[in-house]
Amino acid sequence: MRMNLEQIRDALGAVGTLGGADMTVPSGVQTDSRCVRDGELFFCISGERFDGHTFAAEVLEKGACAVVAERPPFSMDEMQDRQDRPVLIVPDTVAALGRLALHHRMGASAVVTGITGTAGKTTVKELLAHVLSVRGATARNHLNRNNQIGLPLSMLAATGDERFWVMEAGISQAADMDELGSVLRPDLAVVLNVGQGHLSGLGDKGVAHYKARLLKHIARGGVGLVSADYPDLLAEARKNCGELRLFSAVDPAVPYFCEYAGPAGEGRGLYRVRLESREFETEAPFRGAYGAENVIAVAAAAHILGLTSAEIAEGLRTAELPQQRFNCRRYGRWLVIDDTYNANPLSAGRMVESTAENACGEPVVFVMGEMLELGEAAAQAHTELGRALGRACPAAVFWKGGHGGHVQEGLHAEGWNGPFVPVADAGAFLRAFGALGIASGTVLFKGSRSNRLETFAEAFCSAV
Ligand code: ATP
Ligand code: MG
């Protein structure tokens, strides 16, 4: 960011005193009072647990150059003492943060890619940013910061002089995509897939409707890149976007196509890619058919952004996955897949299939947790997951959280009657696992974030 406080006040339509700091250029933007550094602009945001306004005085003491707030954050007495401290008042600090990020984006020279979908956004974001970085500096969201606070903060952390920005947008409520899209205004908007996810917060128009809204916000002259493998997504995409390109991991007739060609070492896969008339093979840091969707999304996006096939293949070959996404490691006689970051029906079903597909006849153990935010679809989604688990013929299934009964229904429907063990914590899991006496194989850990199945994976890895 290169704007001074006076310019920021104008851009935000804010009122307030700048106390002589009009020309000060903030060193950055912050919303977490614990992390404020000298010279940063602090946005007071009211969250579920904390209200940023209560930290206004503290962050100014710590060296923040100004605060943006929805109401005067000090008492009248304090205001008297702090006349030299700039406070900008806006009606809504989250909207103001987005507005500042949009302002920054419109002045940036970077080509901006936005990514959304039900599963694999962070994976594709990280891989694409890695691939593109061979051509020049590439900014991306920090970790999984993809909501109305995290996305603008990620954008504002970039200088704007980078060659590329790659940003994921995650939604859980009906209005979210319009809010995120209008802040990001992507030159290239990628919709990776659609499946059940955040159903309890989204309206009744269907997930595809809300995901495809990103395309509505493409910058002038920009392009939409969408999977052709989900008919409802394709229909919604056509409503929202003029210049649409398609990719597929199913239909070879689609111009951008990829298929899985087999394992390429532990936790890695070989993929055959076709970008219009050009074909090549590449390795990627995951295995199984589900990964073809991520590979082709990355390859097609990089191709549209001007990279060569050789650059794309090399970038995918050297990319690594973020923590807790298909992190595959061998511990003694066990191949451990830590996929504990999150789960929804799409990602859980595909990961179960891929684990079974690559087990090479060795025993497979699933350590899974409840999938959250599914509203009325929860019972059926868990029964479906049970069916997928049953088809994989595991040596055992461990389950944390609710809907275990529905999972069992699905398992039985597939004729599987092996050990199904509900476990509340890592200790109980380890004891139950030991009692089964399975000596080797593959174990997959996966569940929604709040199950904290990474604690189970850590305990397992230290015990075997
Ligand atoms: P979030 O909504 O939590 O931000 P995300 O969309 O960013 O999730 P990732 O964090 O990239 O998704 O991946 C989460 C999990 O989804 C992975 O660990 C993997 O199990 C699964 N996954 C990754 N890619 C796909 C895909 N193309 N299809 C289905 N599942 C996938
Ligand atoms: Mg993510």
Image: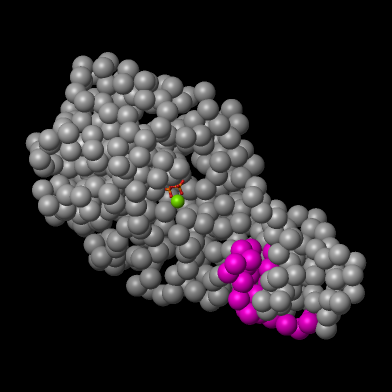
Q: Residue visible at 61% across and 53% down?
A: 148
Q: Residue visible at 56% across and 58% down?
A: 151
Magenta region: 21-44
Left or right for 265, reference 187: left
Q: Residue visible at 41% across and 41% down?
A: 451
Q: Nearer the viewer, residue 228 or 83?
A: 83
Q: Position of residue 315 (x, y in %)?
A: 29, 65
Is 20 included in the stretch rendered in magenta? no
Q: Position of residue 129 (x, y in %)?
A: 40, 64
Q: Residue visible at 30% across and 37% down?
A: 428
Q: Position of residue 300 (x, y in %)?
A: 36, 54
Q: Nearer the viewer, residue 163 or 275?
A: 163
Left or right for 200, reference 408: right
Residue 28, quarter of picture: bottom right
Q: Position of residue 334 (x, y in %)?
A: 15, 47
Vertical position of residue 406 compared to residue 312: above or below: above
Q: Nearer the viewer, residue 169 or 199?
A: 199
Q: Is residue 67 visible?
A: no
Left or right for 168, reference 41: left
Protein image colouring:
one colour
In which quadrant of the rendered image does the N terminus lie?
bottom right
